[in-house]
Image (tube, coloured by chain):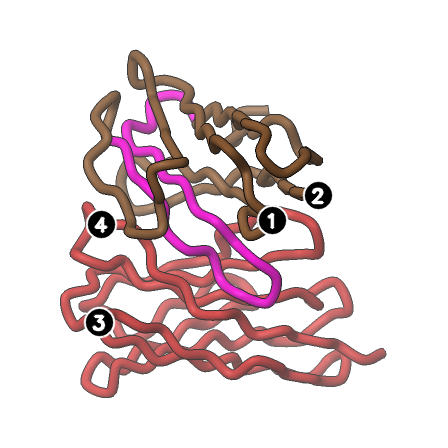
């Protein structure tokens, strides 16, 4: 069945770049998403990429998609302490009409 | 605020009681989703509405759970005869095209 895998933890120093990786299984996914969740809060949409693209940049965020390997990554440049949160990768299962399938999330800790 | 609104933010209930949560989506978003999130996990899909029609239900949605979206606007999620295993964050999301926006969630604690 459909599945999204992420590493559970990442620790970086303030000012460094963070790279969060994700693998997914549904080759029919049309969009792939990155969400951020702070403690006790809902999910904030950070960015998404259409499956026919291989890169998308949005300010400090860069998304890379390798469709052949079903691998997605999120790079955060100049990571700040305010970026500390859990980051979820999600695939749009069943095409654009479908619901989102989430990974378990990567907890990013940013040390000053 | 024009985002997705969920009420209440927190709910503590005794086992066996019924609870109801409300979600007000972003206006003009025709699709509405309910998810459940337990500690250390990503959100898990429960059910999905397109306008007022409930188009998909997960096997996680036991017969104690029911969701409605009258007139295709706000939605309610009811849990009957709550169990301790129902303790979780219940998240609502609305979507029009490609972007799904989430509310702040309702945290349910069953004691």
**Which colour represents chain B?**
brown
Task: Identify the secondary structure beneath mark 3.
Answer: loop
Q: Nearer the viewer, mark 2 or mark 4?
A: 2
Residue at label 4?
Answer: A98
Label at residue B111: 2
State which tag comes first along the sequence, 1 or 2.
Answer: 1
Using the image, determine if residue B84 lies above or below residue A66.
above
Disc 1 is attached to a residue of which chain?
Answer: B
Residue at x-position 49% and y-position 70%: A104
Q: Which residue is mark 1?
A: B84
Residue drawn at x 32%, y 41% is B47
Which residue, as the protein is rendered here, is positioned at the far top?
Answer: B71
> Residue A1, labelled with which disc?
3
Q: Are marks 1 and 2 in contact (CB under 8 Å)?
A: yes
Q: Residues within 10 Å of mark 2 (few under 14, many from 20)?
A: few
* Secondary structure of the residue carrying numbered label 2: loop
Question: Residue B72: horizontal and vertical position, in percent?
Answer: 30, 18
Counting from the top left corner in percent of width and height, residue B2 is at 53, 25
- In magenta, the rendered stretch is B26-49
């Amino acid at each position: 069945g459909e599945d999204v895998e992420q590493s559970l933890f990442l620790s970086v120093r303030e000012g460094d770049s963070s790279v969060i990786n994700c693998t997914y299984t549904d080759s029919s996914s049309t969009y792939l998403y990155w969400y951020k969740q702070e403690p006790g809060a809902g999910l904030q949409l950070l960015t998404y990429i259409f499956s026919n693209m291989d890169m998308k940049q949005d300010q400090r965020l860069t998304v890379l998609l390798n469709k052949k390997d079903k691998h997605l990554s999120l790079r955060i440049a100049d990571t700040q302490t305010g970026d500390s949160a859990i980051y979820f990768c999600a695939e749009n299962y069943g095409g654009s009409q479908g619901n989102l399938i989430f990974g378990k999330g990567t907890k990013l800790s940013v040390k000053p | 605020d024009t985002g997705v609104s969920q009420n209440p933010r927190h709910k503590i209930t005794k086992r066996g009681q019924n609870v109801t949560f409300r979600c007000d989506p972003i206006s003009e978003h025709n699709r509405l989703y309910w998810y459940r999130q337990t500690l250390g996990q990503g959100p898990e899909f429960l059910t999905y509405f397109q306008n007022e029609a409930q188009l998909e239900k997960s096997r996680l949605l036991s017969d104690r759970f029911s969701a409605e979206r009258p007139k295709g606007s706000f939605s309610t999620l009811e849990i009957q005869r709550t169990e301790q295993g129902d303790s979780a964050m219940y998240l609502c999301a609305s979507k029009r095209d490609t972007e799904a926006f989430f509310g702040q969630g309702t945290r349910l604690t069953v004691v």
